Amino acid sequence: MARGCGAWAPGCGRLRDMRVSAKSDYALRALIEITQRWVAGDAAVVSAEELSRAQGIPHGFLQGILADLRRAGVLSSQRGQSGGWRLAVDPNEISVADVMRAVDGPIVSISGVRPESVTYNEHAVVLQRVWIAARASLRDVLENTTLIDLAKNKLPAGVERRSKDEDAWQARVPGS
């Protein structure tokens, strides 16, 4: 791919790989830690320091992520010496997509615009349908996988099936 190509740019010739931000990855890792404790019957709060250590997440970055998750209603916080973070809702009700949206916004956007709002000329209008289909495919996985699934290391059948597809594990490089 040519240097300087964005997610889609004339002359680049292809859509770049989907990227999961560090914020989403860190948020999910922290929530797995909290949810595993919830599953074990330990509803005590977990400090940001403990989450940071357990998952190797930079503490300062994690604090902002935890605040985003609190604003989204996923976590609640407790102040004080024995303060920390706990789930605000049942983890069966929180999907991977919910978490990603809480920290990063829409799952799919094209130059910051949601796919249904993108406009193209008559020669490229078909791209909008591609972006909508890509979003639907991502939703199928991300909205059907919950924090409980992750904490128990047991994915929904359709997600598990996709993850076992040998082709899914193969990297694609330009020209392949």
Image: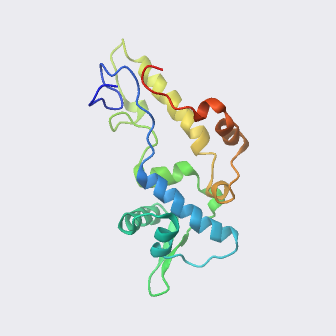
User: Which residue is the extreme one toward the left?
Assistant: 4
Return the residue found at the far top: 123
Q: Residue at x 41, y 65 (%)?
A: 62
In the rendered view of the protein, which quadrant contains the N terminus?
A: top left
Q: Is residue 29 left or right of residue 155?
A: left
Residue 133 position, x and y percent, is 53, 28
Whole-percent x, y for residue 113 in the image = 35, 36
Residue 114: quarter of image:
top left
Q: How many marks?
A: 0
Is residue 89 visible to us here? no
Residue 112 percent coordinates (x, y): 33, 39
Image quarter of residue 18: top left
Q: Which residue: 69% across, 58% down?
A: 152
Which residue does the image show at 70% across and 37% down from the upper left? 161
Q: Is residue 13 left or right of residue 154?
A: left
Q: Position of residue 87 (x, y in %)?
A: 57, 68
**Frontmost residue, 138 versus 62:** 62
Q: How is the image coloured?
A: rainbow
Does 82 appear above or below 52? Answer: below
Residue that protrudes farthest toward the right in the picture? 157
Is residue 9 at least partly visible in the picture?
yes
Which residue does the image show at 44% across and 33% down from the upper left? 17
